[in-house]
Image (cartoon, rainbow, N blue to C red):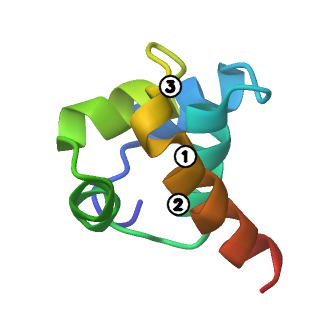
Amino acid sequence: MSHGYSSRLIGLNKKANPKLLGVRLGRVCIKHNIPVTNVASSLGVSRQTIYNWFIGERNPQNLVVDEIQKLLASFSRK
């Protein structure tokens, strides 16, 4: 576990639909050990919102979709 990612959250993320933007964001954050607080702060949402996205319980609203896509693109180049 790192940056507060519980094995439960990691398991829920693995079971979630990989086509969902929030789930993909979660996989990148878990893989690269990016703290949820950093992601939440940069996107202007709560930590709970981020967790909900990571497990596919909620979808990001259009206001942050572009920012998430930029974040994912920056990690795909690494």
Name the residue: 66% across, 20% down: 16
Label 3: which residue?
A: 55
Q: Give the tally of numbered discs.
A: 3
Q: Counting other residues with Cα less than 10 Å from the Cα at mark 1, is it few (<14), some (14-19), or many (20 or more)?
A: many
Q: Nearer the viewer, residue 42 or 63?
A: 63
List x then y, in percent, for residue 10. Answer: 52, 40
Q: Which mark is residue 26?
A: 1
Residue at point 73%, 19% (across, down): 17
* Residue at figure coordinates x 65%, y 35% from the top left: 21
Asked whether, in this view, residue 8 is left or right of residue 40, the answer is: right
Labelled pair 1, 2 in contact (Cβ < 8 Å)? yes
Instruction: Give the CA distance from mark 1 to mark 2.
Output: 5 Å
Indicate the position of residue 19 as horizontal and vertical percent values: 79, 27
Residue 50 point in image, percent of width and height: 34, 39
Q: Amino acid at mark 3?
A: Ile
From the image, tell me which residue sits under label 2.
29
Q: Is residue 58 above or below residue 13?
A: above
Question: Hey, what amino acid is under mark 1?
Answer: Gly
Give the position of the C terminus as an image quadrant.
bottom right
